[in-house]
Amino acid sequence: MSDYIIEMKNIQKHYGDFHALKDVNFNVKKGEIVVVCGPSGSGKSTMIRCINKLEEITQGDLIVNGKNLADKSTDINKVRQEAGMVFQHFNLFPHKTILENITIGPIKVKKMSKKDAEAKAMALLEKVKIPHQASKHPGELSGGQQQRVAIARTLAMEPDIILFDEPTSALDPEMIGEVLDVMKSLAKENYTIVCVTHEMGFAKEVADRVVFMADGEILEENTPEEFFNNPQNERTKQFLSEIINH
Amino acid sequence: MSDKLNKYFAQHRFLYYVLNIALIVSLLKLFQVTSYPEANFSEVLTAGNIKFMLFGMEDEFGGLMLTFYLAFVAIILSFIFGSILGIARWSDIKIFKIPAVLFIELFRAIPHIMVIFWVFFAVPIFFALIFNIKVTTSALTSAIIAFTLFESAHIAEIVRAGLNSMPKGQFEAAKTLGMNSWQTFTLIILPQAYRRMIPPLVSQFVSLFKDTSLVYVIGVVEFFRAATIINNRIYMSFELLSIAAIIYFICAFTLSQIAGHLEKKVEKQINT
Amino acid sequence: MGYEFDWTVLLTYKQLLIDGFVMTLKLSIIGIFLAFLIGSFMGLARVSKNFFVSLFATYYVEFFRNIPLIVQMFFIYFSFTLTDSFPFLEPFGDWIGIENHNEFFSALIALITYTSTYIAEAIRGGIQSLPKGQTEAAKTLGMNYTQTMYFIVFPQAIKIVWGPITGQFLNLIKNSSLAMTIGVAELTFQTQEIDSLTFRGFEAATAVTILYLFLTLFTSYVMTLINKYMLIKTASKGGSQR
C-alpha cells in the first residue's frame, strides 16, 4: 500500500483520434495541495475529471483512495463520495433550495437523517459565510455565492479529496476573492486538494506543489517557489510570462 | 455499443431505413402468427383489391393516390394561408394580430373531425342562409377546405415561433443598413426564419398525411376508406387493417426520415 | 331558401350532450393519466444507457406514432374482442359506467398508445436539453443512475417541457373525437345523433364546439396552475426548515 491517495500511472486518454492525455504520471499524497495549470486544451481538466471517472481513461492505472477505477468490482459511487468535485459552472440544482442542494447528497446517498443533514448543512453555510441564504434558490444568488454553496455541497459528503475544476474562471473579478478565501481555509484542514486554476496567487500562497501541463503532458512540477522563480521548461517559461503580463 | 451503432447508421441512412421497415414488418408478422394464426393475406391482396386501395374506384380518383393528392394540396394551401396568419399573429399591429389570434386559437381548440363535419354540413347552410343559394360541395372539396382551415392554424403557430426565434440583432442590422420593413422581411428575416422552421413544418406535413385518414367520416374514398370498404365486403379486418397500418407506417416513416435528412443539410445555414 | 335556426333542440336533447360530454371526459381523464405514465416511461427508456431498452422504446415510439390514430382504433376494435382477452375490463368498465366496453376500451387504448409516443418524445427532449453539468454534479455526490434521474433530471425535464406536454393532453382531448367512428357515444358522435334526429346539425355542432373549447381552455388553465404550484412548492419547502 503506497501512501499516495491518488495514483495515475501511464495514463492515456483518447477522444476518437484526439490524444488528450499522453502518458500522464501523477501522484498525490494524502493531505497534499496540488495546483495544476497550463494553457487551454492542455488536458488539465480532462485529467482531473478522470480521477472521479467523469471521463474514462483509454489506458493506464488509476488508483484513488486505494481503489483501482478499472476494476469491475469498484463501486464508483463510493469513490465519488470520497473525491468531491467543484465545477467551473457550479452546477447547483436550480429546482432545489440552497439547503436542499447541500442536504440531498447526505440524505439520499449517505442515508443520513434529515435533521442531522440539515444541522450539518447550516454549519457548512456558516463556514462559507452565507447562512441566511438557506431557503433561497440558486438563481437568486450571485456567482460567488453559488460557488460557495457548491463547495459546501461537496464538503457535506465528507470527502477525503476535493477536486476543483477552474472554480473561479466563470466568476466576475470582484467575486473571485470570496471563493479563494474559502478554498484557502480548506487548505489549512486535512483535505487532499487538486485544483485546476489560473489563479497563481492562490498557488503561491497555499500549494505544496504546482504542476504545469501542455498538449496532454505534464511538462514540469515543483514547489511553488521553484516553479515561479526558477522554471526549467521553455514552455513553462512562456506560459508564466504570458500570465504575468496580464 | 450503441454509440458505435448510432455513428454507423448516421452514415448509412438508407440501410437504417430499410432495416427499420423490415423490423417493423417482421414484428407485425410475429404478432400475427402468435395471436391470429388464421390470417390469410393472399385472399385479401388480390389485384383488384390492390388497385382499389391504390387508385380508388373505376372512373374516380381515389385510394392512396388521393391520399397523397389531398395531403399535398392541403399543405400548399395551408402553408400560404398559415404564413400570412403567422406573420399577422407575430406582428404588433392590432388589426392584424387580433383576428389572427382568434382564428388560430379557435381552430387549434376544435377537434379536426369536427372541423371536417362543420365544413361539409355547415357550408351549404351558410350559403343558403346568407346568400340564399343552394350550394353543394363535394366531399373532397370540403375536406380540402377543412384541412386548410385547421392546418394553417398549426402552421401559423410554427411561423410565429420561427419569427420569435430570430435574434433581434438581425432586425437591427437590417435597419442600420437603411432597409424598410418589407425589404427586411423578404431579404433577411423570412429566408432565415423559414430555414429554422423546416423541421416542425415537415413534421406538421407528416401529421397532415396521417390526418387524411379522417376524411373517412365524410365518405371521401382515400386509402383508409378504401380499405374499410373492402372490409365491409369480405370481413377480413385483421388483414386489411394490418396492411393499412403498414402502408401508413412506411409512408409516414419515410417522410420523417426525409425530414431528418433535410434538417441535416440546412443545419449549417442556421445561426443560433 | 334560408335556414331556420332552432336552438331549442339543444334543450330538448341536452341529455345527449351531457352524456357525450361525460364520455369525452372519461376517455380524456383516463387517457391523459395513462398516456403520461407510459410516455414518461418510454421517454426515460429512450435515453437509457442500455442498448436494448432504448431500442425498444425507439421502436415503440416510431411504431405508434406513424400509424394514424383512426387506423389504430379500427385495428384494435375489429381484430379483437377486448373483454375476452382482458376479462378485468368488464368490471372496470361497469364501475366507470360504460355500456359498450369493447368500443370504449379500443378507443382508449389507441388514444393512449398514440399520445404516449408524443409525450415520450417531449420528455426525451426535456431530458436531453438539461445541461450535462447537472448529471455530473449528481454523479460527484455519489448518486447512482436511478437517484440522478428521479431527483435531479426528471423533475427539471418535466418543468422544461410542461408546455408541450400540455399541448399533448389537449391533443388527446381533441383526438377522443375519433372514438365516434367505432361507435363510442362521445361529444362528436352526439352532433351526428342530434342532427339525424332533428336536422339541426348546425346548432348541435355549435354547442359541441363550445363544449370542446371549454374543455380545452379549462385543461390549459389547470395545467398552468399546476405549473405555478410546482414552483411554489419547491420555493416554500426550504423555508419551513430550522
Image (spheres, coloured by chain):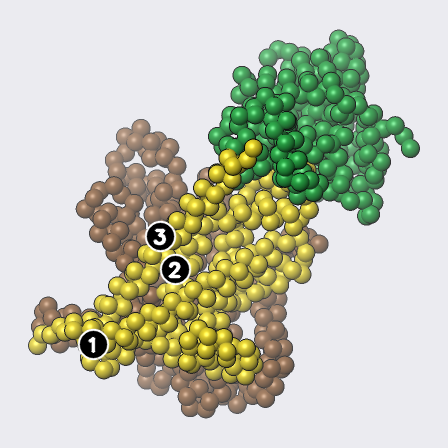
Q: What is the letter of the brown chain?
A: B
Instruction: Identify the mark at residue B139; answer none if there is no mark.
Output: none
Query: Spatial distance from mark 1 to mark 3, Cα to Cα?
Result: 31 Å
Q: How busy is the neighbourhood of tag 3: few (under 14 within 10 Å), some, or many (20 plus)? A: few
Q: Position of residue B132 (x, y in %)?
A: 9, 72
Residue designated by label 1: C12
Chain name for mark 2: C
Q: Say which amino acid is labelled 3.
A: Tyr
Q: Secondary structure at mark 2?
A: helix
Q: Is residue C65 left or right of residue C146?
A: left
Query: Spatial distance from mark 2 to mark 3, Cα to Cα?
Result: 11 Å
Chain name for mark 1: C
| The colour assigned to chain C within the rendered structure | yellow
Q: Say which amino acid is labelled 1.
A: Thr
Q: Quadrant of the N terminus of chain C?
A: bottom left
| Depth check, front residue: C202 or A169 | C202
- The residue furthest top is A229
Q: How busy is the neighbourhood of tag 1: few (under 14 within 10 Å), some, or many (20 plus)? A: few
Residue designated by label 2: C170
Q: How busy is the neighbourhood of tag 2: few (under 14 within 10 Å), some, or many (20 plus)? A: many
Q: What is the letter of the green chain?
A: A
Name which residue lies at 54% across and 53% down. Answer: C124
Q: Is residue A18 left or right of residue C219?
A: right
The quarter of the displayed image where residue B113 is located: bottom left
Query: Spatial distance from mark 2 to mark 1, Cα to Cα?
Result: 30 Å
Residue designated by label 3: C221
- Residues behind callouts 2 and 1 on a single chain: yes
| Depth check, front residue: C109 or A214 | C109
Contact between labelled residues 3 and 2, with CB atoms less than 8 Å apart: no
